[in-house]
């Protein structure tokens, strides 16, 4: 069954709309290109190294929970990890935690949260694990050493490596969501190069990639429609400016206008926007919503 019924009637327009919607999301999670002052390593060596690499990220839900609960005291007055989620201090997107900058600022000022701040400080940490087979190959030592030191590596043709990371491993990576998660993590290690599926893969692999991407967009936790996002925005802003949700409700529209931005609500309530006119951090959290897309099945209907 087709995921988007409009593909049968106006395929070109549907694909254009999908590309436009996806473009609104991807920049928020893009990794900066690899530094140009790095030595460019051989593509095949980098590819073989990455195919045997797994990344443990501190932002993964279970690791984040363990970090937060590690130093818990019975009388520290801090909320449970689940309460952080329920109350809007953090959110879970595709199995990993995030928090808008105004929530992090609120936690360091009027209502300090020691364990929350520790969690935020560690959330970008990562540990690279290479398989024994990869480590045993002496010609891969330089690539492995570079990635362990810098968290990434520069190669001659990152687009080619990113393509091979999918067509040489996607069949053995479990379900579509886990396969895409692994591919995204590995491709970020080479600067997350831009790709066009129809140009770098055969129809079989391109279609598998598209299906995996759509599976994530329609089923991954944390990708919301406007109604769900509005409730979250109201809760987060209420916490960050110490106002009741009923007050915030008056300033957040029930239907998403083209130029809505949460920083404007804080200004109306007499709060100073945080960095870059209030855009810093917020646009990462609300990215994509301005398209009026529910980031799911109705995205291209």
Image (cartoon, rainbow, N blue to C red):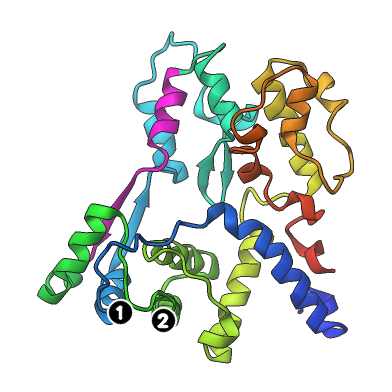
Of callouts 2 and 1, the N-terminal one: 1
**Residue at 80 percent of width and 24 percent of height:** 248
Q: Quadrant of the N terminus?
A: bottom right
Q: Which mark is residue 160?
A: 2
Instruction: Please tell me whether mark 1 sits on a helix, a strand or a loop.
Output: helix
The answer to whether residue 208 is above or below residue 184 is below
For image coordinates 84% across by 49% down, the residue present is 258
Pick the residue in front: 105 or 130.
Answer: 105
Q: Tag 2, which secondary structure?
A: helix
From the top left corner, tell me how far across and down residue 199 is, in percent: 56, 87
Residue 38 painted magenta: no
From the top left corner, tell me how far across and down residue 27 is, in percent. Answer: 58, 57
Judging depth in this view, the residue of 46 and 94 nearest the camera is 46
The answer to whether residue 135 is above or below residue 79 is below
Query: Residue, x 54% and y 65% (percent of image)?
Result: 177
* Figure disc tally: 2
The span from disc 2 to disc 1 (Cα, nearest Å) is: 8 Å
Q: Which residues are magenta?
A: 114-132
């Amino acid at each position: 069954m087709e995921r988007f019924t409009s593909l049968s009637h106006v395929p070109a327009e549907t694909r254009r709309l999908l590309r436009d919607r996806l473009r609104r999301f991807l920049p928020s999670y893009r990794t900066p290109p690899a530094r140009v002052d790095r030595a460019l390593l051989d593509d095949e060596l980098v590819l073989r190294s990455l195919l045997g690499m797994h990344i443990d990220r501190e932002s993964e839900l279970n690791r984040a929970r363990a970090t937060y609960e590690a130093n818990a005291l019975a009388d520290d007055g801090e909320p449970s990890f689940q309460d952080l989620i329920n109350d809007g201090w953090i959110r879970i997107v595709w199995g990993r935690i995030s928090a808008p900058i105004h929530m992090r600022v609120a936690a360091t000022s009027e209502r300090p949260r020691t364990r929350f701040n520790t969690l935020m400080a560690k959330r970008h940490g990562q540990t690279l694990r290479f398989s024994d087979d990869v480590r045993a190959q002496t010609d891969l030592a330089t690539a492995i050493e570079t990635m362990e030191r810098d968290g990434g590596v520069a190669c001659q043709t990152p687009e080619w490596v990113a393509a091979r990371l999918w067509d040489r491993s996607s069949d053995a990576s479990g379900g579509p969501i886990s396969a895409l998660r692994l591919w995204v993590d590995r491709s970020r290690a080479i600067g997350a190069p831009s790709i066009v599926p129809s140009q770098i893969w055969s129809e079989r692999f391109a279609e598998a990639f598209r299906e995996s991407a759509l599976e994530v967009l329609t089923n991954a936790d944390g990708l919301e429609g406007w109604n769900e996002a509005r409730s979250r925005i109201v809760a987060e802003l209420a916490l960050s400016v110490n106002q009741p949700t009923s007050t915030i409700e008056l300033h957040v529209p029930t239907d998403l206008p083209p130029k809505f931005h949460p920083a404007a609500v804080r200004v109306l309530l007499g709060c100073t926007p945080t960095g870059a006119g209030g855009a810093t951090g917020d646009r990462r959290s609300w990215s994509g919503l301005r398209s009026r897309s529910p980031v799911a099945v109705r995205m291209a209907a």
